[in-house]
Image (cartoon, helix red, strand yellow):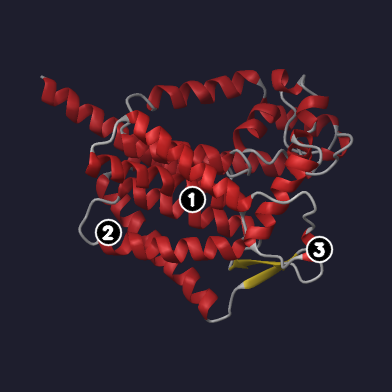
Amino acid sequence: MINAFYHKVVPDPRFMYSSLYLVYIGITVYSYDSGVSRSLIDKIRYTLYVNLGIQFFVYCNGFGRVYYELWENGATRYMGTFTDPNQLGFYVFIILVFAYLTKHEKIDNYLFPISTVAGIFLALQSKSLSALLGLFVLYVLALLRFVSAKLKLSKVALCVGLVLVTSGVGYYFWPSADFRLENVEYTTVNRIRYKLFKVIYADGIKDILRERAAEKILNYPEYFIYGAGEGNYERYYPEPVNEIHSSFVNLFFSYGIIPFAILMAWFKKRLKGLNVVSWICFISILVETTFLVNYRQALFWVAWITLFYLNEEQTDVESISNH
């Protein structure tokens, strides 16, 4: 309705495209949520393992596409069979999250580590920092869980370990005050340092908002109330192009407080009593989607609904056991 209203006021096909995406996602969510089962989840996991292997095969044989950054000569990002490097990064990320969340068979002890190596390698080639950040969170938390289970560490010790790991990684990537991207090779490490440089030495949070096309949340906060729709980006000044590059923030801004509150209520209802693995996946997805718009992709919702289903299945089992 919101997109239809804005399309009536200022005709823009992007409003209708966005509505069609929502219809597609609605059908996907309803269909998968209605028929999800353990056997279906296992089939999806194995299919994703195979697809990740195909992407790795494509890379090794030189069949994949390369994205050339327009602002820097020789700066490239690998995108495989996708049309955008961030799409490849998200695809790899969500596969590994889904696999970690659902793995439970003996063969997963072999397939998951192999997929981890191949997936992280492809994510590094894509230079998708949001995907790499999500993977970093996923594997650091998974490592802490593993160490905690083996050594019976306290929560305080785990927090100290998390701080130390994060501090060490931060120190490695911390850019010098005279860092210039044009003076170094365009690698994933230097791309991370470039992003940090802009935050630390340039405009800070404003730079992050500008890069994520999110300055509009400061300039047009009224849209959080009644929604801006998804289209006619030319109306925004000083950033007339693109949606906000943050999944839930963009949904909130585009559709207003009532639809967003309904979505959050649905999430809250289905996220009660998460176990440790579910929490790790929940946090990882939340971190990754903070910096990209992923909600138009079916796997984004498949991952969430799988998390919901496994959580509810576990809750039902515990309830039966208690009785």
Closer to the camera: disc 1 or disc 2? 1
In the rendered view, does 135 fall on the left or right side of 112? right
Q: Quadrant of residue 201?
A: top right
Tell me the crowding category of disc 2: few under 14, some 14 to 19, or many 20 or more residues within 10 angstroms, Cα based: some
Q: Residue at x 40, y 42 (%)?
A: 141
- Name the residue tied to disc 3: 182
- Name the residue tied to disc 2: 108
Q: Residue at x 36, y 45 (%)?
A: 142
Question: Is any atom of residue 26 visible in this view?
Answer: no
**Residue 262 at x, y percent in the picture:** 53, 21
Tell me the crowding category of disc 1: few under 14, some 14 to 19, or many 20 or more residues within 10 angstroms, Cα based: many
Quote the CA–CA distance across marks 3 and 1.
27 Å
Q: Which residue is farthest bottom?
A: 61
- Name the residue tied to disc 1: 135
Question: Is any atom of residue 100 visible in this view?
Answer: yes
Going from N to C along the chain, the mark reached first, 1 or 2, is 2
Going from N to C along the chain, the mark reached first, 3 or 1, is 1
Quote the CA–CA distance across marks 1 and 2.
18 Å
